[in-house]
Image (cartoon, helix red, strand yellow):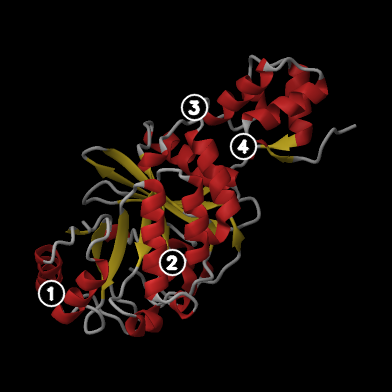
Amino acid sequence: MRLMDQRDICGLMPEELSAAMAELGQPAYRAGQIFRWIHQKKALSFEEMTDLPIGLRAWLGENFTITSLKLKKRLVSSIDNTVKYLYEFVDGAAVEAVRMEYRHGASLCISTQVGCKMGCTFCASALAGFMRDLTPAEMLRQVYEAERDADGPIGHVVLMGIGEPLDNMDNVLRFLQLLSHPEGRNISLRNVTLSTCGLVDQIDRLAGYGLGLTLAVSLHAPNDDIRRRTMPVSQRWPMDELLAACKRYTKATGRRITYEYALIDGLNDAPGHARELAGKLKGSLCHVNLIPVNPVKEAGYRGSAKDKVHQFAEILSVQGIPVTVRRTLGEDIEAACGQLRRETLGVSQSHI
């Protein structure tokens, strides 16, 4: 007789495993063994857990599953060694992850949902439609499989792939607990960046946990008029409300906010836009990351010319706003999120 419904063991905390072991009459240390097999050794089957009794391994197999990912496509940039993965889960849902190499180590951008509901007009993730949320285990497995592929550690995790992380808040919070657990993968949350299009209520909720991660906010406009043309979320939360929530987040956590700003030719890239943005951000603990946007056929967008990008950055800098221009990685493999999934689904291409 099974003691509980079969579920993914990768998403359980040590105390939950301890409860299961106690119910079985197993010693408490078994929970730690299982947890380390999953999160340190990245076991893909219970048969690999050779320091567990055979009977316990059989019971685990009857009552739990271990998330697996099927690698559908792997693209490697010949320019900078960026690697893009298209993964498929057992239900056929496909997501993407991108591993990037920096001087300080490897960074992995992961997905948190299959598709996205937010509808930002410059983003490929939403154009292929929303299917479902990812579980904590499915997020973790993207990290573990990327490390297995690279045969080395991921030092920084970015929740900026397909999906809106704060629209899948409970699963994301559990993922962060598991990712940072000292008996597991033990990645400091200071090495995690979470990107959001600006769900104000969830930003406030996240601030209450005091996790210490970096919040990256997709702003992409200096005012509500422009933002509403590209980001439906701004219909619910105007920019002033969003920026106020960001200030509350900084006050609660002491962490600087990163504002992502995709420069679109003729829409949001004029010198006046830069000055207006600087005025909005003046006095806040922040950093602006300028993104040269790639063409989006469906929206008719074109990226700003390099001289306009640098002029925009110079204006912000003169106004006292810390700014960088994002280095483009993986250009030859279309490393922006949403491409491979849309290609698999037969949807026409466009992206940041």
Mark 4 vs mark 2, foreground winner is: 2
| Disc with the residue nearer the chain's start (1 vs 3) | 3
Identity of the residue drawn at 46% across and 55% down: 96
Q: Is residue 345 left or right of residue 317?
A: right
Q: Is residue 42 above or below residue 207?
A: above
Residue 198, numbered label: 2
| Disc with the residue nearer the chain's start (4 vs 3) | 4
| Disc with the residue nearer the chain's start (4 vs 2) | 4
For disc 3, the marked residue is 182
Mark 2 vs mark 1, foreground winner is: 2
Residue 10, numbered label: 4
User: Is residue 156 or residue 60 the one in the foreground?
Assistant: 156
Q: Is residue 292 above or below residue 73?
A: below
Q: Residues within 10 Å of mark 1 (few under 14, many from 20)?
A: some
Q: Is residue 78 left or right of residue 48?
A: left
Looking at the rendered image, the quarter that the N terminus falls into is: top right
Q: How many marks?
A: 4
Q: Is residue 158 above or below residue 309?
A: above
